[in-house]
Amino acid sequence: MGSIKLATWNLRFDSMPDSITVQQSLDNFPGPLDRPSEFNNILPEMPWSTRRIKVAQQLLDEDVVIADFQEALKRQVDDMLQLLRLSGNPWDFVGVGRDDGVNAGEFSPVFYNTSQVELVEFDTFWLSPTPFVAGSKFPGSPTTIVLLNTHLDDQSDDQRQLGASLILQRARFEAVNRKCPIIVTGDFNSTATGTDDSGAYKIITGAMPMVDIPADFADKFSVPDDSLPDFHMIDLRGQTDTLHVSGNFATFTDFVAPENSSNITDRIDFVFGGSNGGWLSSAYKVPSSLSDEGILASDHRPTFSSISFS
């Protein structure tokens, strides 16, 4: 049985680009003994060049093996690869920009520590448009997993429902054909409850039927009716022992003070496991992305999940 710690995190796109290099950010970063000039003075959104070190620190501190991101532009992808490799571990990623399938637009990349995880294959398709990445294998282990990382539309619940239906169809196809654990991660922009924005969550978890999907997609990833007919994804937070669920509940905070709850929109970032099994969630954590300096690393909190596979 292999075990990994996985992270999913919407990084907030680089909305204030500058020419500051990663090395310059590291050179100007406060030392471990430097006291912040002020505490609890929440700053507005800071440039990516200010936030990126915080992101890398949190991921490395949690000793993650796989890190799934959303909303990352090419510069952010390159920066995270550089920072993670500075840890001394070999990291790589898969993913493409959504605008041209190469480097333009936002990525939903999957980063992985190549000393612990081997990429078997990956592909991308657009959920108008949301990248999709699959395929990791533990070296020397019979355990193969299929990993799907996504970022659903933030405006239309109808579009999110279509996206969730496409993902669920593909996940079921992989479960039937590969007979291995299926993991889905990402920013769903959909809460677990509610009437106006919970459609995607309800579809992916089987609480609501799939909407119609394009015929060519259904044909390419067709599954016999009697093969895992009730397949759905299961929210790993609810499958983790209470004592090992820590941190916060909400995952989106915007760039506001914690006491200002007006922009905290509940839990919209998730880690799911397929109902075909083969996985066990031993820990689930949503820590703060706020440091004493008042810097929020992103407008989303990261989600960490420790998962064993069989």
Image (tube, helix red, strand yellow):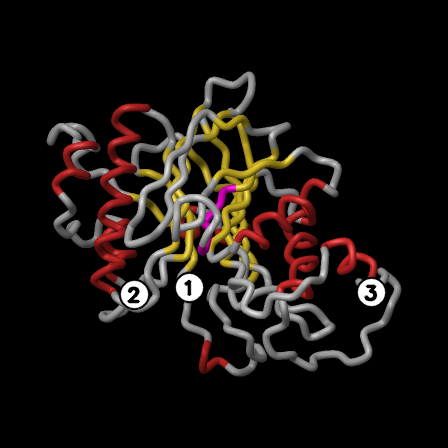
Residue 108: horizontal and vertical position, in percent?
Answer: 45, 49
Instruction: Find the distance from the CA under tag 3 to the CA under tag 2.
Output: 41 Å
Instruction: Find the distance from the CA under tag 3 to the CA under tag 1.
Output: 32 Å
What amino acid does circle 3 point to?
A: Pro
Which residue is the extreme one toward the right?
33
Q: Relative to 76, is 133 on the left or the right?
A: left
274, 15: nearer the viewer: 15
Mark 1 or 2, nearer chain start: 2
Q: Residue at x 43, y 27 (%)?
A: 121
Secondary structure category for the residue under label 1:
loop
Q: Please give the residue where the numbered disc 1 appears in the rendered image.
A: 267
What amino acid does circle 2 point to?
A: Thr
Q: Please give the residue where the numbered disc 3 appears in the rendered image.
A: 30
- Classify 10 Å Cα crowding around label 1: few (below 14), some (14-19), many (20 and above): many
Q: Please give the residue where the numbered disc 2 appears in the rendered image.
A: 193
What amino acid does circle 1 point to?
A: Arg
Residue 9: horizontal and vertical position, in percent?
Answer: 51, 55
Stretch of the chain drawn in magenta: 105-110
Instruction: Find the distance from the CA under tag 1 to the CA under tag 2.
Output: 10 Å
Mark 3 or 2, nearer chain start: 3
Magenta stretch encompasses residue 107: yes
Secondary structure category for the residue under label 2:
loop
Mark 3 or 1, nearer chain start: 3
Label 3 vs label 2, nearer the camera: 3
The dominant secondary structure in magenta is loop
Q: Quadrant of the C terminus?
A: top left
